[in-house]
Amino acid sequence: MEKNIEKERNLEIQKRFRNETGLLVDIPKANFGNTNDGNTRRRFFEDPKVASKITGISYDLIYKLKVILETISSEHIIDPEKYDKYALEAARLYMQLYPWHPMTPAMHKILIHGAVITETALLPIGQLSEEEFAEAGNKHFRSYPQDFARKFSRENCNMDIFNHLLLSSDPLLSSMKNFKRRKMKSFLPEKINLLMSAKPLEAGNVR
């Protein structure tokens, strides 16, 4: 009975997201995985009010998670003390509102251990993300065998794929490519507050 209710609720949420925002959430893809990727995540958190209205999840919680995710992916140095305080507020809110649903390991790591990770990382977390490169690489790896590789030999096919991947990752060739100019969005006030103030680096204090 509970499983049927859960399934119906999931279908209702998927339908509302598709009709109201054009977003495909948790839809299986033909050959691999589902539609839950980085782009889906960004569009979900783009408008916390709409996401809250459709899912029934607290607006305050969704907004806090939006701030946290944008902060750790911003490629700027994060203030660990401020981040820890803000993330723990989000964790407490989650436990207060939804004690019946265990926190996922990924959310636990971000909210509970995120400050330690950002403090000990050599570079800002956003600069270590493989999202952009991995997603682009997967896209190429799916198209190269079909469009640019010989089909009569597995060895030759793999060699053609490898050579095209080398070409696509070559720094000189990449520098000649005309990239689309990205739309710049202003930072949320809460996000700015979680970042380190710009201070001159002292000798022996380079991160």
Image (cartoon, rainbow, N blue to C red):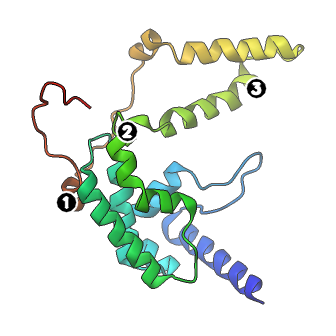
As rendered, which of 75 and 13 lies closer to the eye?
A: 75
Disc 1 crowd rating (10 Å Cα; few below 14, some 14-19, many 20+) is: few
- The residue positioned 14% from the left and 30% from the top of the image is 201
User: Which circle's residue, 3 or 2, is located before the other in the chain?
Assistant: 2
Q: Is residue 199 above or below residue 175?
A: below
- Under mark 1, the amino acid is Pro
User: Which circle's residue, 1 or 2, is located before the other in the chain?
Assistant: 2
Q: Is residue 170 above or below residue 15?
A: above
- SS label for mark 1: helix
Q: Is residue 3 above or below residue 149?
A: below
Q: Is residue 178 left or right of residue 20?
A: left
Q: Which residue is mark 2?
A: 121
Say whether marks 3 and 1 touch (CB < 8 Å): no
Q: Residue 73: tell me if it is visible.
A: no
As rendered, which of 79 and 1 lies closer to the eye?
A: 79
Q: How many numbered callouts?
A: 3
Q: Is residue 103 left or right of residue 85?
A: right
Q: Residue 192: tell me if it is visible.
A: yes
Disc 1 and disc 2: Cα gap in Å? Answer: 24 Å
- The image shows residue 21 at horizontal and vertical percentages of 49, 66
- Tell me the number on the disc at residue 189: 1
Disc 3 crowd rating (10 Å Cα; few below 14, some 14-19, many 20+) is: few
Q: Which residue is mark 3?
A: 146
Q: Residue furthest bottom?
A: 1
Q: Quadrant of residue 137?
A: top right
- SS label for mark 2: loop
Disc 3 and disc 2: Cα gap in Å? Answer: 39 Å
